Image (cartoon, rainbow, N blue to C red):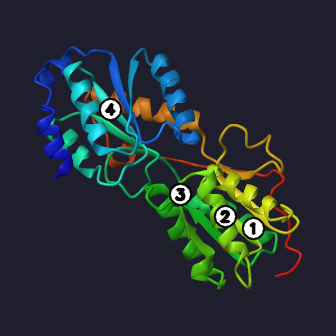
Amino acid sequence: HLVLETADRLGYSPNPFATALRTQRTGVIGAIVRDVGDPFLSMLLREIQHAARQEGVDVLFGHAEYDLQVVGRHLAFMHSHLFDGLLLLGDIQGDQAIIAELIKSNTPFVTVARGESTSFPLVNIDELAGTHLALDYLYGLDHRRIAFVGNLEHGGVSERLKFFRDFLHEKDLDACSAYIQTCANSRSAALQCAQQLLRLSAPPTAIFCATDLAALGVINGLLRAGWNVPAEMSVVGFDDIEGTADTSPALTTVRQPAGEMAERAVRLLMRLIEGAPLDDGEMRAVIQPKLIVRDSCAAPRHN
């Protein structure tokens, strides 16, 4: 209700030129990103700008800053300046009301990198495959005490945690609740999670981080505590953001192909704008991730 009230107060209303836009488009698409400080979303945004240029359209970009009222203002601005469709990058708690407004105003939109469980047009990584790539690799190295670090406010990360729990259950591994550390998606918060894990009487031998940002914070926390990575603790990330090959140790991670995701998202949005008939399968682009093996994982010294 907050979003709808904000939208009303800001004078947000369905675009009065919506019908005309279906035949005479502006050549501008909107992109609202959850947090431009998130390195993966920032990388994705750059790729979207590139993909949009390839399609001959411009991108009007808005930074949500995790704030629904800010999103409401961006929508009001974008509608008043006319745009043909919208990409939503990442998710913000409560933003279903924003999506309801987009549906109501008949605005074409695509959700990107906000988990697979949405019923809207989406482009997302295969979360199950990505989680299994990381965990199968750790399990194959003989790790049996595996911890999780991530921010559950994000749809994709909460799905990764679900698949993490399922994996532990399948392999009959210890699903100790203390091994699941939830925190903000920042290096400093993840560093504290690493410290919590090290205080346990039986610390894990490996840590699966739901983002590379968390993994970098975890490694920092381990090194500060005098632990050797990977000799004493293995760490695997998720995203393959810029710089992860240059850290010490270089980070083993699950790559989300930002370029492919951006191209698919822009192409899907353009087809929706054009009113192309799409079946359910075409409305959901689920991209396959890839495990990038570097130097942050090794067999445990003991289980």
Number of the front mark, 4 or 3: 4
Task: Compute the Cα span from label 1 to label 4.
Answer: 39 Å
Residue at position x 23%, y 18% in the image: 81
Judging by the rendered image, the residue that carries numbered circle 2 is 208
Tag 1: amino acid: Leu
Q: Which mark is residue 86?
A: 4
Helix, strand or loop under label 4 = strand
Question: Is the residue marked by circle 2 packed among few (<14), some (14-19), or many (20+) residues within 10 Å?
Answer: many
Question: Is the residue marked by circle 3 packed among few (<14), some (14-19), or many (20+) residues within 10 Å?
Answer: many
Judging by the rendered image, the residue that carries numbered circle 3 is 127
Q: Horizontally, is 9 left or right of 192 in the view?
A: left
Nearer-N-terminus badge (3/2): 3
Tag 4: amino acid: Leu
Number of the front mark, 3 or 2: 2
Task: Compute the Cα span from label 4 to label 2.
Answer: 33 Å
Helix, strand or loop under label 1 = helix
Looking at the image, can residue 135 be seen?
no
Task: Compute the Cα span from label 1 to label 2.
Answer: 9 Å
Q: Are marks 1 and 2 in contact (CB under 8 Å)?
A: yes
Nearer-N-terminus badge (1/2): 1
Q: Quadrant of the C terminus?
A: bottom right
Looking at the image, can residue 37 be seen?
yes
Q: Relative to the observer, which residue lies in front, 293 or 208? A: 208
Task: Compute the Cα span from label 3 to label 2.
Answer: 14 Å
Q: Relative to the observer, which residue lies in front, 2 or 138? A: 2
